[in-house]
Structures are given as structure tokens and as C-alpha cells.
Image: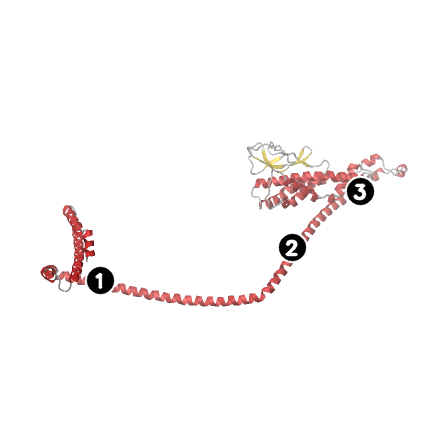
Amino acid sequence: MADTLRRLASTAPYSLLQDKLESWYKDYHLISCDQNLNRCCELVELTSKIQGQLFTILNLTAREGGHYAGVETLKSRLLPWLGSCFTMASSGVTSNTSLNLIQESMEKEKKIRELSQSHEHEIQKMESQLNSTRYQLDSVKQELEDAQFELDDTKNKSATTLLATEDEILQLKAELQAACDQADLYKRKVDVLDDYERQIRMLKEEVSFLTAEKSLLQDRLTRSRSPSPLPRRSRSPSPLLRSDSPTRAQLTNSSRHARLVSRFSDLYTTERLEAQSLLRRYIEDLEMVQRIIFIATVESFHAAKMAFRQFKLRVRKTLSPTHMGPESLDDAVVDYIVRNLDLYDVQSSVNEVISAMNVNPKISFPPEIDFILIGSFIREVCRVAFSMQTLEPPLDLAFTTDGELYSDSKYRRSFDSEYTAPLVAYHVWPTLMEGDTVIVKGEAVTKRGALVCPLLNT
């Protein structure tokens, strides 16, 4: 009881009630009727709460006093007050008010019944859904058990065939390795076949030119016949007749020139693009890829020219002791080289080109890849360059430097060039020259701000 009384005293409800009452009195004539009624209901509610707490204290106090303590006080003060209050309350309630209360009670009961029925309907619906879900769950469990049984069966069957499968895997690996070896062998045979086809074409050309040479010599022999028996008795040809006999290299010079120029153009349009596509798989920078291909072409020509000089010296050293004519020794050397182009050690030139590219500061390559990736392109360029040295006059690449002045007579601009730039940033394809004459234009990229670099590309 003391705790309840202490809480009631600490909250000071009567002070709050007094403050609200004074505030309502001040605003009574200023606010509306509804607001005044709300203020009055608020005070009634607060008064009822305070009375409820006081009745609680009264009950606790009466219990602490025992059965007979405080009886007189309750009889003399509480009971008369309660009687007067109930009399006043009962006198204020009319029959209409009672009917309204009964009607409201019936409506509330009706709503409660409707809510109860709807709640029961929802419960039944949920129970039906729950039963359906349980049925589906049971079917899924059954399917899971069947799948588990099939899985166990498959495991058992797999365990029985595991050793046989491993043997089959080893056998398949061996067959795969054999197939790879056979494919490599076929590839080498295809390369040899290409060489054979190239030699066959050369032999056919040689036969045709020899036929032409034979016809020419027969015509000359027919024209040179006379009734005098003196020339018939002469066994050694004159120096003049000796100088008029052309070699095979001289007879085929124009056709080989046209064929090699066409082949150089094919290298630009076909092999170069294939090598570029291959390099783009590993290098994203297009400029670096084009620089690599250009330097590979230039280094291939340089290596082929060096190999031609060495090969020519060896042939001259071999033929000089036994050469008797009718052509000069230099013509015989070139004629021998033209007839035996297959003796050119192109692989040595390819190795020299790759070694030179590895130390070239202008280009770089991923460490996991080597320049041998474009070895086939380098090989074809070396062969073409070596054959060009047998022409008269020989074909060679133009002198090039990064940052040189652009020349329309030597180059074509690439599609991504700045057409108003006067300097060459870098080269895409070299220019083919015959002495000072341009045979095939090269391709260059022009950009503003290109620095002049004194390093030579040839």
C-alpha cells in the first residue's frame, strides 16, 4: 500500500488536474464546443484514473487493518457517498440510452461473430493448404528416396567399372599422343610437299625456258650455217658467239621479276594480315604489332642478303677452278643459284632474324611468347628476299627511319593517320626499290609530334 501511495504522490495527479482545469477555464470562450467537450472528457478520464488508484489504496488499507478495523469509517463516509453517487448516476440514464447501449452491444456481438466465422474459414483454408503442402512434401521425399536409390546403384556400377575406365583413359591418352605425333608428321610432309610443288614449278619454268633457249640456239645455228667447210672444221666457238649465249638467269629475269613483285604484294595483303591477327591474340597494342611485323620484314631482307652473299662466294669458289665458259663466271654463279634456290638454308636466316628482333629496343613481346610465333611469315619473306637478289638489278627495301619526312612517291598513309602531318611516326610496310625506282609503295603512319629517330631500320 505504501508503494502505491508513494507512486501516486510522486506523480502529483491533482496538480496536473488543477493545471488542466485552469487552462480549460482560460480557453473556454475561445475554443469550439467540440474542443470544450474533449477537454471535459479528458478531465473525467484523469479523475477516474485517480479514483481507481485511490480505491486500490482503500482496499489495501482495509486488508492491512483486519476484519473489523475501519468498519465505522466505511459505514459513516464511504457507503453514504457511494449511495448518493449511484442514485445520481441511475437518475441520469434514460430508457432510450439503455436501448441504445443494448443495440450497440448486439451490433458488436454480431461483428465479433462475423470475425470469428471469417477467422475459422481462413483457418480451414490454411489447413487445406497445409495438407496439400504435406502431400507434395511426401511426394518429393519419395522422389528423393528413389533418386538416392538410383544414385547408390550408379555408384555401385561405377565402382565395378572404375579400373576398366582408367585403362581406357590411358589407352585414349596414348592414342591421342599417337594422333598428335601423326599430325606433326603430316604437317612436316605437307611442308615438304609445298617445297616439292615449288621445285616442280621451278622445274617446269626451267623446262619452258630451256625449250625456248633450244629453239633460239637452233635458229642461230641454222642462220650461222654456210657452204664453206672452214667453220664446220672449227671445234671451238668464237668469243663473240660465246658472249651472245644468254644464261637461264638472264632469260628468266623479267618473268622472275614480275613473279617476285607479285609475291611481295601477296606478302603484304595475305601473310602480313595473318601474322597481325596471330599477334593480336597476345598483344593488344596495334602499333606494337605493326612495328614487329615491319621490323621482321626488314630484318628478313637483311639476313637474306647476307646469306646470298655468302652463298654466292661459296658457289664462285666451287666453280672457278672448272669454269670454261661460254658465259662469264659471275653469270654462271648467278645461273647456278637460280637453278638451285632450294639449297638456301632459310632456317638459319630465320634464326638470325629472331635473334636480331630479341635485342631490338623498339619492340617488345610478352615473356611467355617468343617471336618464333611468326616464324612462317619470316620464312616466306626470307625466301622472297633471297630470290630478289638473283635479279639484275636486284630488288631491295628503301632506307627508312622513324620521324622521316613523308613522301607520296614512297608510301601510302594508313587509315588511322593524320593526313596533315608531315612526319612518319612509324612504318607498317617497307617500300620495294629497284635502284632509285619505286617498284611497290610501302605503308606508313603519319602523326603530328613524331620525333626524328636516327636509328636505321635497314
Residue 420 versus residue 33 in the image, above or below: above
Q: Tag 2's secondary structure? A: helix
Residues at marks 3 and 1, CA–CA distance in whole angstroms: 131 Å
Residue 257 makes an appearance in the image: no
Quadrant assignment for the C terminus: top right
- Going from the N terminus, do you reach mark 3 or mark 1 first? 1
Q: Quadrant of the N terminus?
A: bottom left
Amino acid type, mark 1: Lys
Q: Is residue 180 visible?
A: yes
Q: Up-down: is 451 above or below 113?
A: above
For marks 2 and 1, give the CA distance: 92 Å
Disc 3 element: helix
Label of residue 214 in the image: 3
Residue denoted by label 2: 180
User: Looking at the picture, which amino acid does disc 3 mark?
Assistant: Lys
The residue singled out by tag 1 in the image is: 108
Residue at image position (28%, 65%) is: 117
